Image (cartoon, helix red, strand yellow):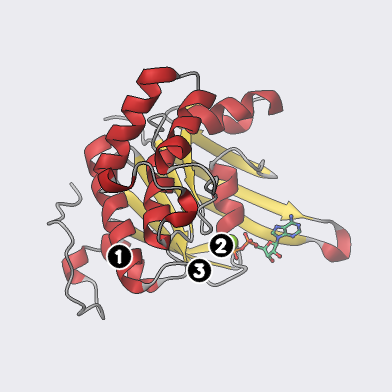
Amino acid sequence: MNAPLLRVDRASREFGSGRTLVRAVADVSFATERGEVTLIMGPSGSGKTTLLSMIGGILRPTSGRVVIDELDITSLRRRELPRVRRELVGFVFQTFNLLESLSALENVEIALNIAGVTGFAAEERAHALLREAGLEQRLHFNAQALSAGERQRVALARALANEPRLLLADEPTANLDSDAGHDVMALLRGLTESKGHAAVVVSHDPRLREVADRVLWLADGRLTSAEPESRVRPSASVGSPTPTTLPTLVLGP
Ligand SMILES: Nc1ncnc2c1ncn2[C@@H]1O[C@H](COP(=O)(O)OP(=O)(O)O)[C@@H](O)[C@H]1O
Ligand SMILES: [Mg+2]
């Protein structure tokens, strides 16, 4: 039996001290496997971004561990963390965070350049990723000329440029209309299966449930339900009668 790709073990994060102490994430444990999309839902302020930041090596837990592909990133020195962020994880943000005056292709190439892939190799790989993201016709458009949904698909291609083990997305559909949000999530779902990384998506958007293998609930920094029974199949998700163009999903063991 392989070890899980990601293991979060009793991770907690506090901010401040004394009267201003905030326990943003409290004693969170869960694990995810390759090819799996885990959705963590919770209201604003429930600790979603804090948790995702700890998983991605941006923020250190006050206590507990984050283990990615058997590497305990919480045991690393601070100066080793940039390498984790560059090589093990890919991030997608609510606001896309593209370089607006660069083309779609250049936005993806830059991520490759930073990791040491340059020239034709970088261009070829960026091109292939954008093709997979359905943006073959948009390669040379500046980011600012793209629709919000297209920008987020570029951001997804960029996040996957260096073949991360883990894709982390923070409210990836919050700035998208319903159709674009659906397309981005269907793409994230498909790429996670085909490339075999694991994806952790945090959001308060219930529409995302239909592409998740598993939904965990966060309230006041605590997971309120992480049981195997909380695995959902898209076909079984309630309250989503909208016609979808999702590929047929084959989930779970
Ligand atoms: N840098 C920080 N300093 C102090 N408090 C913080 C900081 N970051 C987050 N918090 C607090 O931690 C809690 C969880 O925040 P966050 O993880 O951003 O929640 P979410 O992403 O679910 O909206 C909130 O009460 C927030 O105010
Ligand atoms: Mg947040």
Say which amino acid is labelled 2.
Arg
Q: Is 95 placed left or right of 18 in the picture? A: left
| Label 1, residues with CA under 10 Å away: few <14, some 14-19, many ≥20 | many
Residue tagged by mark 3?
A: 42
Task: Please tell me in which quarter of the rendered image ligand 1 is found.
Answer: bottom right
Label 3 – label 2 distance at C-alpha: 10 Å
Which residue type carries mark 1? Answer: His
Q: Nearer the viewer, residue 121 or 32?
A: 121
Image marks 1 and 2: residues in contact by CB distance under 8 Å: no
Please provide percent x and percent y for residue 96. Answer: 50, 53
Looking at the image, tell me whether mark 3 or mark 1 is earlier in sequence order: 3
| N-term mark: 3 or 2 | 3
Q: From mark 3 to mark 1, how far is it between C-alphas? A: 19 Å
Q: Secondary structure at mark 3?
A: loop
Does the beta carbon at disc 3 come under 8 Å from ligand 1? yes
The disc, 1 or 2, on the residue closer to the chain's N-terminal end is: 1
Q: Nearer the viewer, mark 3 or mark 2?
A: 3
Nearest to viewer (mark 3 / mark 1): 1
CA gap between label 1 and label 2 equals 28 Å
* Residue type (three-letter) at the residue carrying disc 3: Gly
| Residue 83 x %, y % | 57, 25
The residue that appears at 46% across and 27% down in the rendered structure is 112
For label 1, the residue is: 182
Along the viewing direction, whichever of 138 and 46 lies nearer the viewer: 138
